[in-house]
Image (tube, coloured by chain):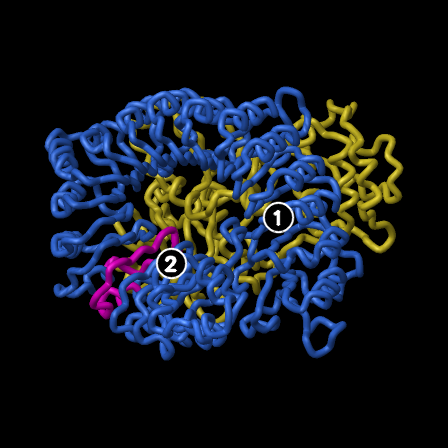
């Protein structure tokens, strides 16, 4: 479905299909597509190809007649077009998971570090308490609420199927909070709004912090949250040597076990997360019942 | 030598030179001037901590009192530099401990600072006065406690936008009762609540306090008491600006504000309840700097506030201000010099506010002194950019970010080459430029031809070929920092302009088309350039020859090109084996 395939004499046509959708806006032009191929084999283009979805192509298909000038022809002599040597592999993500930059959502695609807003600023913004007064004053339409629908959230049986109510007046943003795990100095960040329930959050954290978890056997590392007679169990992790428990700091500065309150209430009061060794968590004043 | 002044006289003359450039020029006159100058230099600025080593600095300048240094490249702010890359402050702090017992000031930006470093600072320097950590990370509130407890003459503690592991608010209570020297305290990036009593007492016993930036955890109800104890404040950062609507809280706050006759700058404003904004009206006419970039306030309330601030010179605000608010700004703030508009919903697919290119056009028309802009929006046109350039040829900094990084002119669907071309053509004093939108090699041609004073350029998702990069490198005479991401720029332009790179501080290229082979070649050709290949996919030579590296960071240096703290995902030239990267 690529509009880029027409009438170009580039040697490696198969590369073009990976060039789809670079235009995240309208106006796909000849010059732009050209530079995709000129880029040669590079992790960055895989990056794009791998994660764009049909939603991004919707606007592109219509604009097939590119009227663009051919500044490209004069530059072609300098352009390096990689032919045989470079095989763009279908899989190769640029950065191994858990190692590098945070992925932000941009519509339904993800581009690292874009838009260029500092994390610091986004966390501050997203943790805003939206007072009822300000909510009334805003007359902004409730748009982009479908954002959360695109994020991969497995809603398993035990987990309530929450459609987080989108507050009127404010467009729903990300809710990044810091996560630290005992024993590791540098923390990570997680977008709580990308998940609809505790279980989804646990999986995400499990991915982030327990790299020994095998893809299929995630269940063995993470205790599924279950409602036992209506009482939730705390969220636990296990890294082979010790038990960890997920805790959070609330608005009042108190540290609580994650899982005790309904998800929405948790969202409105959480400030940051900490994956604590079970032995240290005893001081939290909550009984940690052993799961068996 | 018959005509030379005694050293003391020369030293005295040099003491009037404050600019680094002047001092560097003086050092080049002759050997004896070089020697005299180096003994009397008291401040240095190191723009890239890896451009030089602590040993070299200490050897040349034995009597420093103030050190300012930057670490990671700017794109680290957007998570493009993997964690663990470097920029550790500790080696510097440790080396300086012995060399500079009289050190008074340390200012670091984008560096990794540990509690250990902070403790060392607090214990090593008897007259330590100023600690500024901008966008730093790696330390906790324990480190702050050391500083508070041990630095008897502390004047400034400024943690702007640093990532601090917040263990507790207790650190503030470590300031001894005898500490009365504070001039500036910026704790706005911290999360925990500090003891309000301790804070109030600290403020009360600091008669020279000019800058106080609180953190979000300081509630509005406490603000009045704090301000009352420091009516001499020049810069105030509030905490959360919300409380139950109560008339006594309001009047308390309004009274406190009205006593602050010297207030010039306001910031903070998390969680704003607009009804409390009028409490500040009494100080608005004196305000020159207003940072509302965390304040979710509707446009109408923003306008009411801003129109009270006729002497405003700097405004940072969220896009809730909308075009209508910017029109009002243009009408009432004729002294405006700097405007930054941040996105309230950067990841939303649809616009949530009515802020377009028109807002920027209005401000450029109405504010004759406007010279610095950072503007996030969702649409732009060549016509608007051309108008802006015509209105405001005095721009020094122009940073435009269109949320969709390759958006064309939304009216004509053409690239935005002409628009940015107008900017660089008309704004002859332009020193910093960031561009977004659909851009071809043509815009780089314009930049190369016109942007002769440009020092820093940021490019993303732009250009067609190496020619674009070549235009920039060969044409921009004053270029110091170039940062590029996701552009089809590669080996040819880089190698053809190798010599240029040594005249710059640094070049960053990520997700471009630079091959490992070119990096090797560049490093061989240019022994004073460190060419760092930052790639998390494993050894670069394990991939096919033409494969592009994830990131290349090229900077000039007089230090070793194999820095000792290199993580395993960074490769540089191996001095021993000329053709092999280690």
The colour with which the image depicts chain A is yellow
Q: Quadrant of residue A95?
A: bottom right
The reply, left or right, for residue B126 in relation to residue B76 is: left
Q: Secondary structure at mark 1?
A: loop
* Residue beneath the point at 84% across and 30% down: A6
Q: Secondary structure at mark 2?
A: loop
Q: Observer-nearest residue: B93 or A217?
A: B93
Q: Residues within 10 Å of mark 2 (few under 14, many from 20)?
A: few
The answer for which chain carries disc 2 is B
Q: Position of residue A165 (x, y in %)?
A: 42, 31
The colour with which the image depicts chain B is blue
Q: Which residue is mark 1?
A: B477
Q: Position of residue A262 (x, y in %)?
A: 36, 42
Q: Position of residue B449 (x, y in %)?
A: 66, 39
Residue B299: say if magenta.
no
The circle on residue B395 is none
Q: Residue furthest front?
A: B2
Q: Quadrant of residue A126?
A: top left
What range of the chain is rendered magenta?
Answer: B144-169
The circle on residue B18 is 2
* Residue beneath the point at 70% across and 52% down: A43
First-in-chain label (1 vs 2): 2
The answer for which chain carries disc 1 is B
Residue B159: say if magenta.
yes
Q: Observer-nearest residue: B457 or B219?
A: B457
Q: Position of residue B221 (x, y in %)?
A: 17, 40
């Amino acid at each position: 479905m690529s509009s880029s395939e027409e009438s170009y004499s580039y040697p490696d046509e198969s590369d073009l299909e990976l060039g789809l959708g670079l235009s995240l806006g309208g106006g796909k032009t000849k010059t732009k597509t050209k530079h995709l191929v000129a880029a040669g084999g590079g992790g960055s283009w895989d990056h794009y190809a791998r994660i764009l979805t049909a939603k991004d192509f919707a606007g592109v298909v219509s604009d097939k007649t590119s009227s663009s000038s051919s500044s490209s022809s004069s530059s072609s002599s300098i352009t390096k077009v990689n032919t045989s040597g470079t095989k763009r592999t279908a899989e190769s993500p640029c950065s191994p998971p858990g190692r590098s930059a945070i992925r932000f959502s941009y519509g339904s695609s993800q581009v690292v570090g874009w838009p260029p807003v500092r994390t610091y600023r986004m966390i501050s913004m997203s943790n805003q308490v939206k007072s009822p007064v300000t909510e009334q004053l805003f007359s902004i339409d409730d748009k982009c609420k479908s954002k959360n629908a695109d994020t991969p959230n497995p809603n398993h049986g035990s987990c309530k199927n929450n459609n987080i109510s989108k507050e009127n007046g404010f467009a729903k943003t990300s809710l990044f909070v810091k996560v630290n795990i005992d024993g590791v100095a540098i923390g990570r960040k997680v977008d709580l709004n990308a998940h609809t329930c505790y279980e989804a959050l646990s999986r995400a954290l499990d991915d982030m912090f327990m790299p020994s978890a095998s893809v299929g056997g995630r269940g063995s590392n993470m205790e599924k949250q279950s409602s036992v007679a209506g009482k939730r169990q705390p969220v636990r992790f296990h890294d082979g040597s010790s038990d960890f428990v997920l805790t959070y700091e609330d608005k009042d500065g108190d540290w609580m076990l994650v899982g005790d309150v309904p998800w929405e209430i948790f969202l409105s009061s959480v400030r940051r997360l900490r994956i604590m060794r079970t032995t240290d968590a005893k001081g939290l004043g909550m009984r940690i019942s052993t799961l068996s | 030598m018959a005509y030379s002044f005694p050293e003391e006289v020369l030293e005295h003359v040099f003491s009037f030179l404050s600019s680094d450039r002047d001092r560097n020029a003086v050092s080049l006159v002759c050997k004896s001037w070089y020697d005299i100058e180096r003994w009397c230099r008291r401040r240095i600025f190191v723009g890239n901590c890896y451009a030089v080593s602590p040993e070299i600095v200490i050897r040349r300048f034995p009597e420093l009192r103030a050190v300012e240094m930057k670490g990671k490249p700017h794109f680290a702010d957007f998570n493009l530099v993997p964690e663990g890359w470097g920029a550790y402050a500790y080696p510097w702090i440790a080396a300086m401990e012995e060399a500079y017992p009289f050190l008074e000031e340390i200012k670091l930006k984008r560096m990794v600072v540990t509690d250990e470093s902070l403790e060392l600072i607090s214990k090593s320097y008897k007259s330590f006065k100023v600690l500024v950590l901008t966008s730093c990370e790696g330390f906790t509130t324990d480190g702050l406690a050391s500083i508070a407890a041990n630095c008897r003459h502390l004047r400034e503690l400024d943690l702007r936008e640093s990532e601090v592991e917040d263990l507790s608010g207790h650190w503030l209570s470590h300031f001894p009762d005898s500490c009365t020297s504070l001039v500036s305290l910026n704790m706005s990036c911290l999360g925990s609540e500090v003891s309000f009593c301790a804070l109030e007492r600290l403020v009360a016993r600091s008669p020279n306090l000019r800058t106080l930036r609180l953190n979000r955890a300081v509630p509005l109800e406490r603000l009045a008491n704090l301000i009352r104890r420091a009516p001499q404040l020049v810069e105030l950062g509030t905490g959360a600006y919300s409380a139950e609507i109560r008339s006594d809280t309001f009047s308390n706050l309004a009274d406190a504000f009205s006593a602050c006759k010297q207030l010039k700058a306001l910031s903070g404003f998390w969680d704003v309840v607009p009804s409390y904004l009028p409490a500040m009206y009494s100080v608005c006419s004196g305000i020159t700097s207003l940072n509302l970039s965390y304040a979710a306030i509707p446009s109408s309330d923003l306008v009411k506030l801003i129109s009270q601030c006729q002497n405003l010179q700097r405004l940072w605000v969220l896009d809730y201000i909308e075009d209508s608010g910017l029109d009002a700004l243009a009408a009432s703030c004729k002294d405006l010099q700097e405007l930054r508009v941040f996105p309230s919903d950067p990841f939303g697919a649809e616009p949530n506010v009515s802020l377009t290119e028109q807002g920027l056009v209005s401000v450029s028309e109405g504010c004759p002194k406007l010279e610095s802009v950072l503007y996030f929006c969702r649409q732009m046109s060549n016509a608007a950019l051309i108008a802006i350039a015509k209105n405001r040829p005095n721009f020094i900094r122009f940073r435009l970010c269109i949320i969709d990084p390759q958006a064309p002119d939304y009216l004509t669907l053409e690239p935005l080459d002409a628009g940015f071309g107008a900017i660089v053509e008309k704004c002859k004093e332009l020193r910093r430029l960031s561009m977004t939108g659909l851009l071809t090699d043509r815009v780089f041609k314009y930049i190369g031809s016109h942007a002769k004073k440009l020092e820093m350029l940021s490019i993303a998702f732009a250009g067609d070929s190496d020619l674009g990069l070549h235009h920039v490198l060969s044409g921009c005479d004053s270029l110091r920092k170039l940062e590029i991401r996701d552009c089809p720029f590669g080996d040819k332009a880089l190698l053809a302009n190798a010599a240029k790179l040594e005249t710059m501080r640094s070049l960053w290229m990520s997700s471009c088309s630079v091959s490992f082979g070119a990096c090797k070649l560049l490093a061989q050709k240019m022994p004073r350039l460190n060419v760092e290949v930052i790639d998390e996919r494993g050894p670069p030579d394990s991939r096919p020859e033409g494969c592009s590296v994830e990131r290349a960071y090229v900077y000039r240096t007089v230090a070793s090109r194999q820095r000792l703290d290199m993580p395993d995902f960074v490769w540089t030239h191996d001095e021993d084996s000329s053709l092999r990267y280690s």
